[in-house]
Image: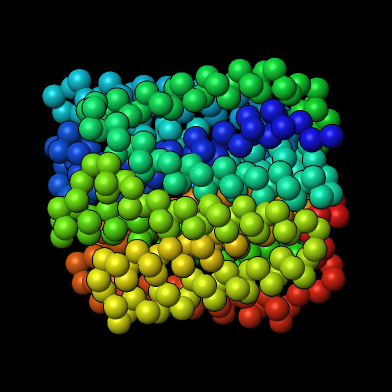
Amino acid sequence: MMNKKLVGIIGLLPILMVLGNSMLIPILPSIEKGLQIDERWSGWILSSFTIPAAVCIPFIGFLSDRFGRNRLIKYSLWIIFVGSILCAVSAWLESPAFLFMGGRGLQGVGAAGTTPLAIALAGDLFSGEERSKVLGALEVFNGIGKVLAPIIGAGLTIFLSWNNAFWIFPLLCLVILSGLEKNTSMAHDEEGILGVRKYVGDLAAVFASKWSLLLPLFMIGGIGLFLLFGILFFLSYHIENTFHIDGFFKGFSFMFPLGAMTISSIWSSKRLKMDEERGWYYIKWGIGLMTVPLGALVFFHSLGSLLFCMTVCFGGLGLILPVLNTFITGSVDEGERGFVVSLYGAVRFLGVALGPIAYSVWKEDILAMYGLTFMFSVCNVLLYLLIMKRRSRVFRPGIN
């Protein structure tokens, strides 16, 4: 029977990762002023977190296969704890940028052991239909975090200075550590320790047989999150600089697209179960729902059009992400799952990292920005067509 308390604790890990960036998007201008940095460098406030995470995720995945998910998750949480404190206290210095960016880097290193290992751990602890439900629930937690994070960030700045938002991370880390201590044991970790030679051989066999399907699935998730965080980054500046909306109301505007993504994630995860064909169907329609509205933005530039098209687009992304989690996690055995899922997490994180950097440059020419956004969405269409051409019965999610 499913341990709902354990699912809730594991579900806090994606929320912790999401808070690392989404909470800061509405308050980026405030952080810029506090750090005394130019607007051109603001994208690095987000990317100083996501780039270290993307680099470290594959190594964390490898170590988790060798030494256990629990152990690596706990180490990761303590690293986030320390990094968050450095970010919070950096505001007390005359030149805070260096210490702040160092703290953000540590947060990113720790975040490498949150969502990817949560997905891998869920794959280890649950099987069959339960696994699909739990993996879908993790994506729902992810979506809920994305909805609440901008409101939390914007709301806190009304009452407190920007740096006090970072005290949320140590508090959440302690809650998760306590929950893991009470609901999991290290015994399960010891079962997964393999010899390095056998481990590498097993990984090579997995990629030799499934790379033509795994790689496009990785890319679809990475491009989707690249577009999500890039457009959210642009929306944050567009709302404040063009319409002079700040604080709580700016955070509230993020609820529409992110709320649509969360609702569609819940719907997709509940209906996915073990039906492979239904999963491919959701990917097809999710990509379609992303591509059409992003193409429409080339012609319609008002704030209302932007919010409407983003809402439809992110609703499509919400259909896709639970399916990707289930397909990728179920495609490999427990011994290789940490590394394979972590590679997927690294691609997702690269999308999150590069989105704000790209859009900080592209936003100077809005029409060109919308054109490039549409081209990236078309890339996902091409990837889906490639998958459909190569798909074979060797790839059967959920059977491992």
Q: Residue 325 location, x and y as percent?
A: 66, 54
Q: Quadrant of residue 11?
A: top right
In the image, residue 118 sits, relative to residue 274, either above or below, namely above
With respect to residue 339, does 376 lie above or below? below
- For residue 144, side relative to residue 275 (left or right): left
Residue nearest the viewer, comparing 328 with 155: 155
Residue at figure coordinates x 27%, y 28% from the top left: 163
Task: Judge from the rendering whether residue 271 lies leftward or rightward of residue 320; answer left or right.
Answer: right
Quarter of the image with the N terminus in it:
top right
Vertically, is 168 above or below 293? above
In the rendered image, residue 175, in percent from the top left (x then y), is placed at 55, 21
Report which quarter residue 99 is drawn in. Answer: top left
Image coordinates for residue 31, horizontal then vertical, percent = 22, 38
x 15%, y 47%: residue: 38
Q: Is residue 212 visible?
A: no
Colour scheme employed for the rendering of this structure: rainbow
Q: Residue at x 57, y 79 (%)?
A: 382
Q: Please state the total of marks drawn on the protein image.
A: 0
Q: Is residue 67 above or below residue 389?
A: above
Q: Position of residue 391 (x, y in %)?
A: 76, 75
Residue 191 appearing in the image: yes
In front here: 297 or 13? 297
